[in-house]
Image: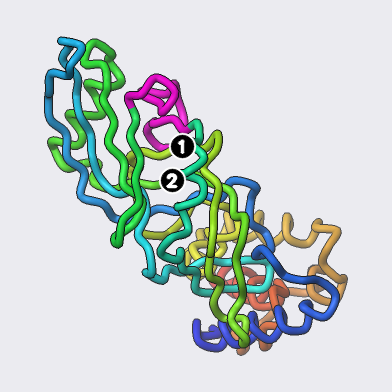
Amino acid sequence: MTDMATLRQQAAQARAGAAGSTSMAIPRDRPESPEIRFTSQLRAKKVTREDGMDWYEVEGYASAFEQGYEMWDMFGPYTEIVSKGAADKTLGADPEVVFRFNHTGTPMASTRNQRLQLWADEHGLGQRAWLNPKRSDVQLLVQAIEDQDVREQSFMFRITAGQWSPDYTEYRIHEFDLERGDVGPVTYGANPHTSIAARSGEFLDLIPNLPALVAREAYQRLAQRSDLSPATAAAPQTPAPTRSAPPAAQGRSISMLRTQLLVDADED
């Protein structure tokens, strides 16, 4: 199997080659609103606000500045860093942001109703939300936080300014936009991420242990992709009799994936 250092080097070389035809301003394969997850010490407590009502106050950091984490694009793995100050402009514009669990479901608080407070400091993007204790989803979330089943946070945003390092191994986010985004607790944080591009690394790690049926199905689906050449995607007419070393990966070619999938299927 190709090691991670080799994948990083090959991915960087592929990006450098693509840079001749594009500015590479934003990493490839990133959704419009990419999600980044960070470990965050969540705290939940019941408080009485000035309105005389009781609320659950949930506080923590939705991001961390100047801390590298692994991401994937169409070429392979790279390191991404959110710069200190990246949130200053968007916070100054008073963005509309909601608070919710795992980026889904009905919002529990928002900046619009003044029950979600956001700030940026030397550590990262902080948030404090006041949640209605009468809501069943809020009760479940607070209980999960108190039981430490949910301990981490995430935020969803749009990259508005960023830059690749000279060797294309690192992408630094200089500025992001939170307008119509969200913050809140997530089941898993601190990378892996949930975008398809980022989860490619998880798929590679799972390949050696895929059951034969799943491996064959994955191989067939990869072979049907229109963006892959016949040389890398077409199935061989006869099964490989013995395990052979996988061919060297070329950018994000599936040759390495195809070989491993077929070998695992034959062994079963």
Start-end of magenta stretch: 97-115
Tell which of 119 and 98 is nearer to you.
Answer: 119
| Residue assigned mark 1 | 182
Query: What amino acid does circle 2 point to?
Result: Phe
Question: In x, y percent, where is residue 226?
Answer: 86, 58
Q: Is residue 240 above or below residue 38?
A: below
* SS category of the residue bearing label 1: strand
In-image side of 27 versus 189 (left or right): right
- The residue lying furthest to the front in this view is 92
* Residue 183 rendering spot, x and y as whole percentages: 40, 39
Name which residue lies at 59% across and 46% down: 33
Q: How many marks?
A: 2
Identity of the amino acid at label 1? Answer: Asp
Q: Nearer the viewer, residue 216 or 33?
A: 33
Left or right of 18? Residue 119 is left
184 with respect to 253 (left or right): left
Cα distance between the residues tagged 1 and 2: 6 Å
Identify the residue shown where x is 67% and y is 59%: 29
Q: Residues within 10 Å of mark 1 (few under 14, many from 20)?
A: many
Residue 242 in sight here: no
> Which residue is disc 2 drawn over?
155
Disc 2 packing (10 Å; few <14; some 14–19; many ≥20): many
The secondary element bearing badge 2 is classed as strand
Q: Quadrant of the N terminus?
A: bottom right
Is 107 one of the magenta-colored residues? yes
